[in-house]
Each structure stands twice: as structure tokens, then as C-alpha cells.
Image: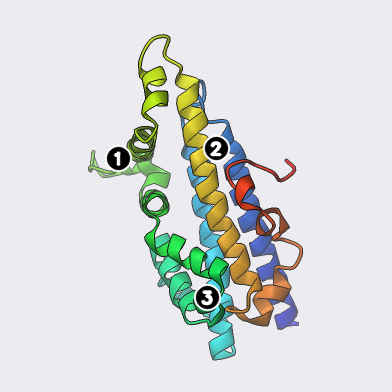
Amino acid sequence: MKTFLINISINDEIRIGFDCIKKGLIELSKFGPTTIHLFIPLLLFSNGFERILKVLYCCYFNQNNSRYPKNIELRKINHSLKKLIEELINTLESYELYTRASARIDDLNFLKYNEDFNEFIAIINEFSKNGRYYNLNVVSDNGKDYNKPENLISKFSNRIICRYPNEKENICNPPYNTQLFFDIFNKFLIEIVQRFTRILCFAFTQGAYGADARQLSAGLLDDFLLLREDQLSSINFVH
């Protein structure tokens, strides 16, 4: 009976995690001149990524210890996406497929070396720790210097736009095509999120996390698992 309940809970957690990521992508796609706040997508991404990474952590722990981690063991990770991704990288590197299959090697290289992905994760990680309750933190800590979520994203987006000098000219000069700024940034960030999410899906299916991970995620991964390279920058799932 306990095993059945655990399996149901893991399946539900996987579904909820990917639903959060999907809803985060939908909210991100609305980012524009009249919708300038990214609090909701950041909240959904941080929640969804944390849930999925913790499920993978639990599956790997069970595979090696014949039991799932106790609450006190799981809480050691807290809300640190950085730690969870380090655990992900270590697990995938120890699995032979990720040393010989070119697509899986590319996945690892993206996690380890892609500067844009790692900067985005740093933003989400900071948001998870302090940004979710930024306003209350400022109130309760009497103005302690927290990084405001909008400021972190603003710096990131400005660096991305600088890679497109012609488009930047149209954005920064009359008639100020501000929509172009959001079109470029949204597409760029959607690709990062979906590439990372696809990597998480393959982690469930490729064997590194055991049979439970593959079985309990069945039917929940297709919206991201089947994405081709040319589909990563646009939302293709039904919503």
C-alpha cells in the first residue's frame, strides 16, 4: 500500500512540475510592452524545475539505497536549484550513455558550459531564495539590499539584445520598436527553458535514474521530449 501511494505521489509531482513549466512558458510569451513583469513566470519556472529535479533526486536515491530519502535528507537541498543541477550533472556523467551518445553529450555540455543557461539558472536560484518574497523581505529586514527579480532579468535581457546590433538600433531609436525587444528576448528565453526541460525529460527515460523514473513519468514527457531543434524557440504544446 505504501509503495502504491509513493508511486502515485511521484507521478503527481512529475505532472505538477511539468504543468508549472508549461504555464511559465505561456506567461513568458505574454511578456511585452504592456506586460512588463516576469514575477509569475519566474515563480512557475522555479517551482517546476525544483519539483522535477527533486523527483529525479529521489529516484536516484532509491536506486542506490533501496529507499526514498527522508524529509530531513531532502530538505538539505532546500530550494537550491544550483545544488540540484549539480546533482543532475554528476548523475548523468556517471552513466555510460552520456559519455558516448552525441546528443546526450551535448546535453551535458549545455548544462555545464552554456553561459546563458547558467546565468538564467543563477537568476532563478536567487529568485527561489529571496525573490519570491522580495517585497516582504524588504519590509521585514528594514531595507536589506536584496536583488529585485526585475533587475536581474533586465540586466540579462539587455546583454542578450546587445548581440543583435541592427535590431537594437531599431529598438533604441525613433520610432522605438519596443515590441522587437520582447520578440527577441522571449524567443531566446523560451528556447533555453525548453532545451533544459527536454534534457530533464531524457533524464527520466535514458536509464540513469532507474526503471521507476522511466515508468512513473510515462505519458507525461511528450510535450518536451519530442521537441526538434527547430521547435525549441516556440511553444508547440496545446494550451
Residue indicated by mark 2: 28
Name the mark on residue 98.
3
What amino acid type is highlighted by mark number 1? Val
Give whichever of 1, 238 is nearer the camera: 238
Please say if 223 is above or below 188. Answer: below
Give whichever of 113, 12 is nearer the camera: 113
Residue indicated by mark 1: 138
Could you tell me residue 209's position as x and y percent?
59, 78
Of pointers 1 and 3, the one earlier in the residue sequence: 3
- Locate the N terminus by quadrant: bottom right
Residue sitting at 40 percent across and 64 percent down? 112
Query: Relative to residue 44, is residue 217 drawn left or right?
Result: right
Could you tell me residue 119's position as x and y percent?
36, 50
Distance between the Cα atoms at labels 1 and 3?
Answer: 44 Å
Q: Secondary structure at mark 2?
A: helix
Binning the other alpha carbons within 10 Å of mark 1 as few (below 14), some (14 to 19) or many (20 upward) gives: some
Binning the other alpha carbons within 10 Å of mark 2 as few (below 14), some (14 to 19) or many (20 upward) gives: many
Q: Where, by quadrant of the figure, is residue 23 drawn?
A: top right
What amino acid type is highlighted by mark number 2? Leu
Binning the other alpha carbons within 10 Å of mark 3 as few (below 14), some (14 to 19) or many (20 upward) gives: some
Residue sitting at 55 percent across and 54 percent down? 195
Of pointers 2 and 1, the one earlier in the residue sequence: 2
Q: Are marks 2 and 1 in contact (CB under 8 Å)?
A: no
Of pointers 3 and 2, the one earlier in the residue sequence: 2
Could you tell me residue 199's position as x and y percent?
56, 62
Give whichever of 34, 120 is nearer the camera: 120
Please say if 41 is above or below 105. Answer: above
Name the mark on residue 12.
none
What amino acid type is highlighted by mark number 3? Tyr
